[in-house]
Every structure is written in structure tokens, then in C-alpha cells.
Amino acid sequence: MRGALADGPALTLRLTITIDDVDAFIDAPDHRAAAHGTVDCEPLGGQLPVREGWFNLFVPSGLPGRRRMLYHLLLDGPQGRPLTLTGRKEVGDDPGPDLWADTTTLAVEIHRGHHEPGEEPGPAPLCTGVVRVGRLDFVRQLTTMRATGAAPLNGLIRFGRFFAGELWDAYGPGR
């Protein structure tokens, strides 16, 4: 995912999302998976490794018919300085076609220090911005999906049904 911080510098997320057990992931209300990779941003020190990260898919937002995709990444900044990136996608049907924008637009904040999910990060964020998944990046993402285990194809099918079903519940007619 590529985007820019509010003051203009580029920000790129290169993440691998890992779901160890698709059935448990789908059944869990927080649909939490591990996130690993890097965040690239020159003004923050270049390539910042993700020490530990989480991704939550289609969690309730508190509003009917609306869900969120959440990112929480603990980063290793320059000179060992800890940083936390949080990101949120708001998913829900609004007037006009918005499914693409909702699912590919990530609002991000980066705070000093490492903060656990749900923990207040303290003072104002170090920086904010918007990261978007481009159409070619989306196609590339689809080609990288892998499943392991005794029945890998069944895992991919179950995940695909879950994902499509959540989108249908949010954007389908008569929702």
C-alpha cells in the first residue's frame, strides 16, 4: 500500500498478513491475524521493520451495517526509537459507489513509543496520512495468497466466502 503523510512525504506499507487457522480466524469476533513487514518513510528514517503487528478484518464499528479493518504495527525506528502505526478502513455502504474506496483507503497515524491495541497512545500523533491500494497492487496481492495445511484449497475457499459474505452484508441490496 502506498500513500502520503499529511505533509506530503511518501509512506509505503509492505506487509504479509498471516492467518494460522482460517476457521478460528473466521469464528473469532475480532478476526485478528499477524502482520509482518516494513513501513517505508524517508522522513521517519527510511525502512522501518515491523517488530510485531496485528490486522483485524471486518470488526464491528458500533454502527449498524458498518465494519472496520484495523492495522496496529509496532515499528523499530531509527536509533532504536519505537514507533506505533495504527490504521483504519471504514467499511459500509454510503450513497454512490464506495466499496473500492472503502476497502483500499487506509487512514494512518504514527505515534512515538510502542502502544498495545486499545491502549491510548498519549499526545498527538507524530504524523497522519492516507495510504491507498492501487489497482495493480490489488491484483498483485491476489496472486500472493497462499494456504498451507492438510486442505489448503479449502482454507482459501472458506476465507474467500467469508470475505465476499462480509462485503455482501455491507454493500449488497437490502442490507
Image: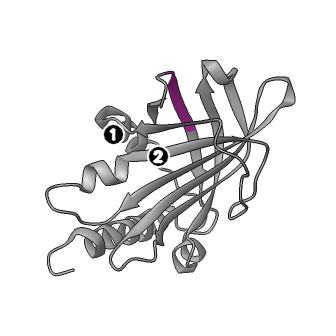
Which residue was labeled with disc 1? 139
- Residue 125, image x, y percentages: 64, 42
Give above or below for 162 relative to 52: below
Front one among 33 and 3: 3
User: Is 164 left, or right, of 118 in this rendering?
Assistant: left
Query: Looking at numbered disc 1 in the image, what kind of residue is underneath it?
Result: Val
**Residue shown at 76%/30% (left/top)?**
77
Give above or below for 7 relative to 91: above
**Residue shown at 44%/38% (left/top)?**
130
**Residue shown at 14%/75% (left/top)?**
173
Query: Looking at numbered disc 2 in the image, what kind of residue is underneath it?
Result: Ala
- Residues at circles 1 and 2 in contact by the CB criterion of under 8 Å: no
**Residue shown at 35%/80% (left/top)?**
64
| Mark 1 neighbour class, 10 Å CA radius: few under 14, some 14 to 19, many 20 or more | few
Magenta-drawn stretch, dominant element (helix, strand or loop)? strand
Q: How far is the residue under mark 1 from the one under mark 2? A: 21 Å
Give above or below for 3 relative to 55: above
Of marks 1 and 2, the one in the foreground: 2
Give above or below for 89 relative to 171: above
Q: How many marks?
A: 2
Q: Secondary structure at mark 1?
A: helix
Disc on res. 107: 2
Q: Secondary structure at mark 2?
A: strand
Q: Which residues are magenta?
A: 9-14
